[in-house]
Amino acid sequence: MVVRSQLPDVDVPRVSLHEYLFGDVAPDDLDRVAVVDGVSGATTTFRSLLAQIDTLAGAVAARGFGVGDVVALHAPNVPAYVTVFHGLLRAGITVTTVNALASGPEITKQLADSGARLLVTVSPLLAAGEAGATGAGLSADQVVVLDGAEGYTSLADLLADPHPAPDVSFDPATHLAVLPYSSGTTGRPKGVMLTHTNLVANVEQSLLIGVGRDDVVPCVLPFFHIYGMTVLLNLALRTRARLVTLPRFDLAQYLGVIQEHRATFLFVAPPIALALAKHPLVAEHDTSSVRAVLSGAAPLDEKLAAAVRDRLDVRVLQGYGMTEMSPVSHVIPVDRPDISPGTVGLLVAGMEARIVDPATGTEIQQPAEGVSGAGELLCRGPNVMVGYLGNPQATAETLEPDGFLHTGDIVTVDADGVFRVVDRLKELIKYKGYQVPPAELEALLLSHPGIADAAVIGLPDEEAGEVPKAYVVTAPGATLTARDVMEFVAEQVAPYKKVRAVEFIEAVPKSASGKILRKDLRAAG
C-alpha cells in the first residue's frame, strides 16, 4: 500500500537553485539583511549578497571552472560560506560539502572520490585541508583559503578580480548541484548525487515548516550537512528570513545570539534540545522571542520535546529525512499543534511512502483507525537522489526500480498519516546528529597490527544520542589498552567519530556468512 501525502502537491519549478532562490527578489527586499555574522555582528544585505555571488561566479569561471567541475567546500558556518556555496552553484559547478571536522585522510578520500578540482577552506581548518588536498594530488593553487593564508588565494582576491557572472546552461533535473557524503543505510561514506531540481523541490516542500520573511534563524547546525544546507540556509534565503551564522555550538554564545538578535525559529538536533531543556544558562537569557523549535538529524524523545516546550513556552516540532532525500520527507507543520512532537509528523507535499516488513517483504497497510504495525520506511518523491556517485551496486541496494528509497528506519503510521520512528534497521551510529558508520571504524581498527578483529556498535548516551563502542580482539602476543585503541582511532578521524569505549573480547560474533552480529553485542551490553 502506498501512503500519499495528504498535502496539496507542489509545483516544482524547472529552474536552477540560484534562479529559484534569487530570481524573484523584490526591489524592497534588496536592502533587507540576509546574513548576520553571529560573532562580529557584521551584516550582509540581499543586494550585497547577490553582488558577491555574481562576482564569485565570474571569478571561478574566469579561472576555468564551470559546468561539469566539482569544487569542495570545507568551512564552518560563516557568512562567506553563503557567498561561496551559491557563487559556485551560480557558475554551474557541483559542490561537494566537506565536514568541517574531517581529518586530512578523510578529506583526501572525498576529494579523490568526488573528482574535485579545487578545495575551498578557511585558515583554522587549513592543516587538515592542506593534508587532504595534498593526498588527493591538488597543488597549492588548487586551494583557496577564504580568510587568507600565505601562499594561497583568498576570497578577497577572488572578489577583487571582477568578471561578469557566466551564462551557463544545464538541465536542472539532471545536473548535479551538490555531492554531500552519506553512509546511507550502512557502510562507508558515498557521494549522494542531488540535482538542482532535488534541492528546489525540497525547499518548496519545506515551506510548510512555516519560516517567514520576519523570522530570525540562528544557524549553528552546519551548512555542510544537508539539514543545515536545505532547512536553514536555502529555506531562509527563499523566504527572505534573516540568517545569523555561528561557526560552532557554544551554548552561551548561542543563547546570546537568541537574545541579542531576537531569534524566532530555532533549528536544532537533540543534544541542543537537551541543553535548552536542562542547562541553567538558559534561565539567564531572554528567549521570549522564540516561537518555534524544530529538531531533526536524530530522533527526539517525546519527554525531552515536552521539556523544551514547557521551559521556553514554544511550539516544538520534529522532522525526518536523510541526505538521500535532500533531506526532508516528513515534518510536523507549525500550524498543527495536534500532532505529538514525539512523532516525525506528516509526509511533505509530493512524497509517497511504503512500509514493508523487513523480514518478509510484506506491505504493511495504513489502518483506518489506530496505528499500523512497524516496518521499514521507503519513500519516493521529487527530492530523492539520483543515486550514489560511481557506486551502482549501493544505488541499486538503496533505490528500487520504481523510485522508492530504502531509509533503513522502522516506522509506524496512524490513520491520520502521522509517522513515528520506532527503531533503526540500519547500523549507523548517530553521534550528536552526525552519522558514524561502524564499517568505517572497523576497517580502521583492523589496520592496527595489534588488532586481530573488531566490531563497533552505538551505545545510548543522554547527551550525544549514541557513542561508538569498539569490541576488540587482540592479535597473538599484542598488548593493548583501551586508551591505546581510542588514541589510534582519534588520530585518524573527525572528533565525532572517536571511539568512546573499548571492550576486549575473545571473538567477534558473526553469522555463517561472516556478517557481524551486532545485536548479540548489544544484548551482551
Image (spheres, grey):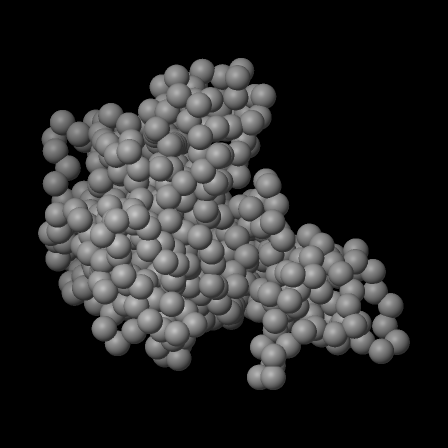
Left or right of 79? Residue 134 is: right
In this rendered view, identify the residue nearer to me: 96 or 161.
Answer: 96
Q: Is residue 500 visible?
A: yes
Residue, far front = 369
Rendered position, 127 above or below 291: below
In this rendered view, identify the residue nearer to me: 166 or 387.
Answer: 387
For the N terminus, the quadrant is bottom left
Rendered position, 181 above or below 58: below
Q: Position of residue 55 (x, y in %)?
A: 27, 46
Residue, far bottom = 513
Seen at 44% across and 30% down, the residue is: 306
Q: Please identify the quarter of the rendering in which residue 83 is found.
A: top left
For the C terminus, the quadrant is bottom right
What is the number of callouts on the image? 0
Left or right of 328? Residue 1 is: left
Seen at 31% across and 37% down, the residue is: 339
Q: Please identify the quarter of the rendering in which residue 42 is found.
A: top left
Q: Is residue 52 visible?
A: no
Seen at 36% across and 54% down, the residue is: 412
